Amino acid sequence: MKPYLSIVVYFLFLGCFLIKAQETRDTLRVGYTPAAPFIIQEDGLLEGINIWLWRRVAKDLELEYELVPMEFSQMLDSLKRGQIDVSINPLTITGERSKSMEFTHSFFASHSAIAVAQQSSLQKIRQFLGSFLHINFLRGFLLLLVILFFFGTLTWLAERKGNPEDFRPGFRGVWDGMWWSMVTLSTVGYGDKAPKTRLGKMAAIGLMFSGLLFVSGLTASIASSLTVNQLESGQNDFQSFKTKKVGTVKSSEAGDFLKAHFFKDVELYSGVVPGLQELKEHKLDAFIYDEPILRYRIKKDASLSMLDVLPLKFDVQFYAFGIKKNAVELEQDISQRILELIETQEWEVVLNEFGLTEL
């Protein structure tokens, strides 16, 4: 009788083990990392567009799952190795990623954008003053001094004997000539000094004509100097950022895009917030990442109010859930349900709730 009892006990244990294994196998490991407004983690609670979408899909398909928080790059590596079954982050569909994971149907389209720090008043003043140190302006200013000195001295030489009241002898008379030339050229015209001799009046005519032409050229030089400095520090051209220090998230599509477009100095971060904090501290010239995530984070975080997102749009991206490789049936089931959900009015309401609109 004992051998039969042993066999029964053995099969009971085996059955329990198989049931437990089946339960473990049916529970999906779902990786995520905060990426507001798609995944928002606050006070231990999860919300956001992707959270809403995944919960609806899992409920409708009766999927058992456990959420596993991870860093972005760790989540991608785990998905590629099959250590997690699903990533519910807004992953950009790319050819390279498709080699190591499956993608569901896209549920949102966006693009990359550039965040920059606003210039302080002091920086704007320094930039303006720096324009006057431009080589073209300095050359013009030096030539102006030469013109003033030449005609001032010439007038003094002509007037010192016939008009000693206005143009005194010696060094003081040279200063009188300089004063008169500056007042005349600037068209202030105090009238405290004026040439009376024929040669002095001819010198005055020469000063007025040459000064008029020169001042016009100097004004153009100053305007050119200011324009050049503004163009050099301008932030309205995507190409201008290739030589600047920029940041993005490690293992992101934005990082691949910057590498493919030959950006020279790229700093990689574990998430958006660390990068934006360093941008705020002017350790970066710009931070490049997904536009809706940048805008939402800057809008919600008061400490980042000095940051702006430029109106430059590039690198169109289609977001989807990532599924471990060869889990084709799971991917098809989830994709079908996503398609059905994003065609509903409810999906539009969810997007509007978080301030998002489709491209």
Image (cartoon, grey):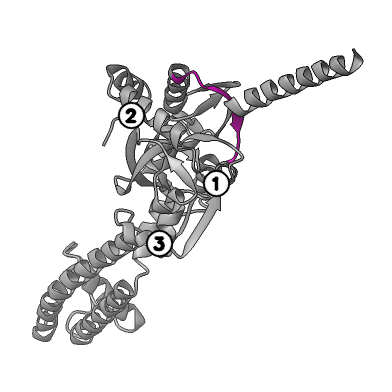
- Figure quadrant of the C terminus: top left
Determine the CA span between mark 2 and mark 3.
28 Å
Residue at 18 percent of width and 79 percent of height: 163
- State the residue position of label 3: 260
Which of the image's four quarters has the N terminus? top right
Q: Which residues are magenta?
A: 61-71
Mark carried by residue 80: 1
How far apart are labels 1 and 2 at the CA level?
A: 30 Å
Residue found at the very far top of the displayed protein:
1
Residue 350 lies left or right of residue 74; in this view the side is left
Where does residue 57 sit, x and y in percent of width and height? 43, 22
Q: Is residue 287 visible?
A: no
Residue type of the residue flagged with mark 3: Ala
Amino acid type of the residue tagged 2 in the rendering: Leu
Mark 2 or 3, closer to the camera? 3
In front: 200, or 93?
93
How far is disc 3 from disc 1 in space, using C-alphas? 22 Å
Q: Nearer the viewer, mark 3 or mark 1?
A: 1
- Identity of the residue drawn at 50% across and 27% down: 40
Residue shown at the point (49%, 18%) measured from the top left: 62
Instruction: Out of 354 and 53, give the one closest to the viewer.
Output: 53
Q: Is residue 186 left or right of residue 46?
A: left
Residue occupied by mark 2: 356
Residue closer to the observer: 29 or 211: 29
Along the line of sight, the residue nearer the viewer: 44 or 88 = 88
User: Could you tell me the amino acid type at mark 1?
Assistant: Lys
For residue 341: magenta?
Answer: no
Q: How far across and how far down the image is residue 254, in percent?
A: 42, 50
